[in-house]
Amino acid sequence: MHDTKLLAATIEAIVVERPDPAQCPQHLCLDKAYDNPTGQAATEAAGYIPHIRRIGEEKLDTNGKKRHPARRWVVERTLAWLHRYRRLSVRDERYPSVHQAFLTLGCVLICWNYLKARKRVF
């Protein structure tokens, strides 16, 4: 299911107590996928001030040039790296603790390879 269909449910599922929006306005930054009337309405209905980048809009510096090339979000990249490990892509473990152990091992291997590629391993 696309993220925009779950935006209202995700906002309602937040477990951290928010301050009163009348006293302390709350801002919510979203990417271009939420640039539609549904995303705007769900954000405003929850009492947030939406900051949604428009589709086709690029972030430019003061000279009007693109500063950085488009990049994937860190979470999406990390999940893609974890899916390279076959045991994690299909969960067939009987106990959640075993799956958690393999997930931790996958994260350790990702960090190790990242540091090794940058020659920061001792």
Image: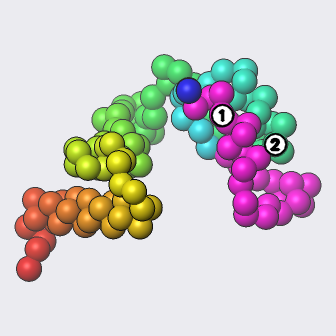
Q: Which residue is mark 1?
A: 6
Q: Given this view, does label 2 or label 1 mark the residue nearer the observer?
A: 1
Q: Start and end of the magenta stretch?
A: 3-28
Classify residue 112 by image quadrant.
bottom left
Give the residue drawn at x 53%, y 21%.
Answer: 55
Looking at marks 2 and 1 on the same chain, the residue that comes earlier in the sequence is marked by 1
* Residue 20 colored in magenta in the image: yes
For this rendering, which residue is in front, 35 or 10?
Answer: 10
Residue 12: horizontal and vertical position, in percent?
Answer: 76, 46
Residue type beneath disc 2: Ala
Left or right: 108 in relation to 18: left
**Residue depicted at 12% across the width and 71% down the height:** 120
Secondary structure under tag 2 reads loop
Asked if disc 2 and disc 1 are in contact, CB closer than 8 Å, the reply is: no
Q: What amino acid is at disc 1?
A: Leu
Depth check, front residue: 83 or 46: 83
Relative image position of residue 25 (x, y in whole percent):
81, 54
Residue appearing at x 86%, y 54% in the figure: 21
Where's residue 19, x and y in %? 83, 63
> Any magenta on residue 8?
yes
| Residue 92 in the figure: left or right of residue 7 | left
